Amino acid sequence: MAHDFELRRLTDKLKKLTEEQTRVNHQILKSRRDEQNELDYIRRRFNSQIHSLEEKQRRITKETANYERQLANLERDIQDEKDSDAQSIQTNQGNHYNRHTR
């Protein structure tokens, strides 16, 4: 009779340990799935952020090139206008000189 009690006690403990081991295994698997899901989420979030920043960088580069081109055109127009003014002044001075020498 004492052996029956001890046998039942030990089998109950083994059964509880087996059930606990099963629960722990399920928790491990769930934790691994959760980890993978979080890693995927973080990877997607950073990829999206990087893509957005790269797109912004391309837009800024394009705008910079456009403004540099506008600046170069404006500087050229200003220089052309100065050259034209200088040429017209020289022409007027030459005409003025010619009128006095006649």
Image (tube, rainbow, N blue to C red):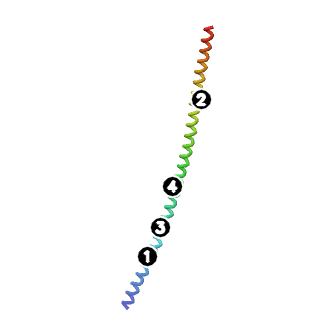
- Which residue lies at the image location 53% right of the left edge and 46% below the top edge? 57
- Mark 1 or 2: in front is 2
For residue 8, the mark is none
- Nearest the viewer among 60 and 36 is 60
Q: Which residue is mark 2?
A: 77
Alpha carbons under labels 2 and 4: distance apart: 46 Å
- Give the distance between the C-alpha atoms of the residues marked 4 and 1, in whole angstroms: 37 Å
Question: Going by the picture, which residue comes out furthest to the front?
Answer: 102
Which residue shows up at 57% across the image and 41% down it? 63
Location of residue 87 in the rendering, given as x and y in whole percent from the top left corner: 59, 21
Nearest to N terminus: mark 1 or mark 3: 1
Residue marked by disc 3: 32
Q: Residue at x 56, y 33 (%)?
A: 72
Residue type at tag 3: Arg
Q: Which mark is residue 46?
A: 4
Quadrant containing the C terminus in the rendered view: top right
Q: Is residue 15 above or below residue 66?
A: below
Q: Amino acid at mark 2?
A: Asp
**Residue 21: which numbered mark, if any?**
1
For the view shown, which residue lies furthest in the bottom direction?
A: 1
The residues tagged by marks 3 and 4 sit, at their Cα atoms, a distance apart of: 21 Å
**Of residues 66 and 46, which is closer to you in this image?**
66
- Of callouts 3 and 4, which one flags the residue occurring earlier in the amino acid sequence? 3
Could you tell me residue 67's position as x and y percent? 57, 37
Q: Check whether the beta carbons of the residues at disc 3 and disc 4 lie within 8 A of each other.
A: no
Amino acid type, mark 1 = Gln
Judged left or right of residue 13, residue 100 is right
Q: Secondary structure at mark 4?
A: helix
Mark 2 or mark 3, which has the lower sequence index? Answer: 3
Mark nearest the camera among 2 and 4 is 2
Mark 2–mark 3 distance (CA, rounded to whole Å): 67 Å
